[in-house]
Image (cartoon, rainbow, N blue to C red):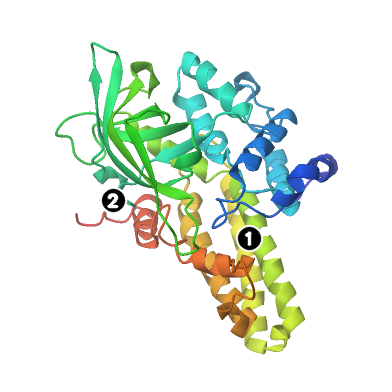
Amino acid sequence: MKIGFSAADEQFRQHVAEWMQRHLAGEFAVLRFRGGPGDEDFAPALRKAWEQELAKGNWVGAGWAREHGGRGLSITQQVIFFEEYARAGGPGRMGHIGEGLVGPTLAAFGTPEQQQRFLPGILAGQHFWCQGYSEPSAGSDLANIKTRASLDESSGQWLISGQKVWTSLAHESDWCFVLARTEPGSVGHRGLSFLLVPMNQPNIRVQPIRQLTGTSEFNEVFFDQAQTSADNLIGKPGDGWKIAMALLGFERGVSTLGQQMQFQNELDEVVRIAKGNGAAQDPVLRQRIAHAWSGLRVLRYNSLRMLSGTQDGSLRPEATIYKLAWSTWHAELGKLAMDVLGPQAELLESGPYQLTRLQALFLFTRADTIYGGSNEIQRNIIAERALGMPREVR
């Protein structure tokens, strides 16, 4: 595992930091430290424009291979970019699903024609994607999905019917990748397929879900004979589970370091307030702050360990613990933030009575241990896939 950085790496870090300082200015200055989890409804049009600004600097898909239009940055350079992006206050990425999930999946499983059709729009910061996995009866248990798709041979279109839920930024997306059951009567992970579906069609309805924070960045999505071309199937019919699992492996990739820098920004804010209001004088709160700091370092070292292996979408044993570890840590940070704020945590000081950054953090982290795979499911994954223990009785 490589923890340090070379002189050339540090020179590259300086280049990234200077680029961010120059470009995260002017009209984009208001985006600093905005648009992250719990704040994803902030200025979506301006954040889409920011994606195009990143694209002009050749930072979108910077880690993709050159043959796919990327910059071919090394793992170390990608780590540096994500760290400096977060340190500079780079906003939550509108294009992260396309860049971090769809792109690597197409590179691994898509045909050359599919790659040529879809990758340029992602690289240019012009096409935005959402994820059609979870359903009302299949949140953490993807193998239980009911959304179905059938191929109409006469029109050459897949017809999709069903419902997806917790679909982040579906209302801002041009495309959705959908895991659907294409083999009638199939159960479990068999008979599933991976489809790319255009969102701008009358047979798709997006309904926002209002959250505890008052925002609505995720949605229910209803498919009523929604259509997508036969050549928008990735892999073969029935390959959906394999591709879906590989995509989740890409999700636990280099961007985890950027996520941790965002966590560091939040912890820094907690420390700043604790010093300002005297909470840092409380020995118990001081101990909890130190525990949060050390926990974040452990997350970093585990991520570097994950990134030391192949980046082919396979779920390495150390990657299986990451979601459980960060969600538990982040939820505890939310509680710590409220305790540091003290009585002010319960108050909205003046109009328009918007949540402060730490209040929104606390409320949003209530969901961290549920979305993206609940902690209970994550423990099953660790036991069964990483430790080789007997499968849970189903």
- Based on the displayed image, in which of its 4 quarters is residue 352 positioned? bottom right
- Based on the displayed image, in which of its 4 quarters is residue 152 positioned? top left
x, y percentage for residue 63? 65, 33
- Mark 1 or mark 2: name the one nearer the start of the chain: 2
- Residue at image position (62%, 37%) is 48
10 Å crowding of disc 2: few (<14), some (14-19), many (20+): few
**Residue 125 to residue 230: above or below:** below
* Dot 2: element: loop
x, y percentage for residue 76? 70, 41
How many numbered discs?
2
Q: Nearer the viewer, residue 6 or 99?
A: 99
Quadrant where the C terminus sits is: bottom left
x, y percentage for residue 28? 74, 44
x, y percentage for residue 85? 72, 47
Outermost residue, front direction?
A: 351
Work out how far the residue at label 1 is from the one at label 2, CA to CA, in angstroms.
Answer: 30 Å
Instruction: Work out whether residue 47 can be spotted.
Output: yes
- Residue at image position (65%, 76%) is 289
**Residue 155 to residue 49: above or below:** above
Amino acid type at circle 1 is Phe
**Residue 9 to residue 384: above or below:** above
Outermost residue, left direction?
A: 185
Q: Nearer the viewer, mark 1 or mark 2?
A: 2
Amino acid type at circle 2 is Pro
Q: Is residue 316 left or right of residue 46?
A: left
User: Residue 263 got which mark?
Assistant: 1
Q: Is residue 257 left or right of residue 386?
A: right
- Residue at image position (63%, 79%) is 341
- Residue linked to disc 2: 136
**Residue 146 to residue 195: above or below:** below
* Dot 1: element: helix
